[in-house]
Amino acid sequence: MKIIDAHHHVWDLGVRDQDWITGDEMAAIRRSFGIDDLRPLAAATGVTATIMVQTVTVAEETPEMLALAAADPLVAGVVGWTDLESPRVAATLAELKALPGGEKLVGIRHQVQSEPDPDWLRRPEVLRGLRAVAEAGLVYDLIVRPHQLEAASDAAAAVPGMTFVLDHGGKPAVASGALEPWASALRALAGWPNVVCKLSGLVTEAAAGMPASGFAPYADVILNAFGPDRVMFGSDWPVCLLAAGYAEVVDLASALVADLSDADRTAVFVTTATRVYLDGKA
């Protein structure tokens, strides 16, 4: 089975700093990572297409990612960034689409997890921006923490024409083993049919050396809440390298969905991402 990796990053520290990569605990990824670093890892694990996702709230990053995608068939789509509170959201998105690689712009993301305002996703200006993203035919990736899932539900309700993609399952507290209040908030968000979820990013929320069985309760909540046809795999490479190698992340995801039917496993690894991001282009 081919695999679509619906969530990875690249960055070049020679172009700009990634100011979130600080401290000894981040040393493993304190270097530049490009598509050429990912390519052999993808080939070895059956990954045939990827979605490249923004890392910083810098306008220049998205054109750079689009240019990379234009030159590399491995990258099937780009989730970029724009200032949702700007009155020029629609115009900016049109400008991005007109750039080299612009046809590969599939979504927008903002680091909501770093916003101190718990109501950021409820701001009228943000909702106006989200409507512009939807009108441009793009999806919106949600990078939030558990306490922000309720606001994400409100945004999904306020913009029903938008497809929202929850990154990293909403970052549950895997290391502690606690399911609540994350699980209840996740189920509420999954109640909105315009929301899908990535089975991604769990290894960096876990204790070192956690076996697959430790992740299973979280994967089960995600799969039962959304259903496999609204769940997609993502590696979160190279961030995953803080806890696990690329092949290990793919193997973990395979283990977590091993009890599903062939059709449901295909949904997680291929079909959902294709439908949501690529519309059959991958």
Image (cartoon, rainbow, N blue to C red):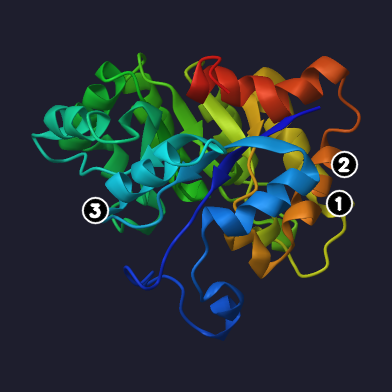
Which callout, 1 or 3, points to the residue nearer the camera?
3
**Whether residue 105 is situated above or below residue 263 in the rendered picture:** below
The earlier-in-sequence mark between 3 and 2 is 3
Q: Residues within 10 Å of mark 1 (few under 14, many from 20)?
A: some
What residue is disc 1 on?
Answer: 212
Closer to the camera: disc 1 or disc 2?
2
- Residue 225 x, y percent position in the rendering: 67, 26
**Residue 55 screen position, x and y as percent:** 41, 55
Residue at horizontal 75%, vertical 57%? 177
Relative depth, front residue between 1 and 217: 1
Q: Is residue 276 left or right of residue 233?
A: left
Residue 105: x, y in percent? 36, 32
Residue type marked 1: Ala
The type of residue carrying mark 3 is Glu
Label placed on residue 142: none
Residue type for callout 2: Ala
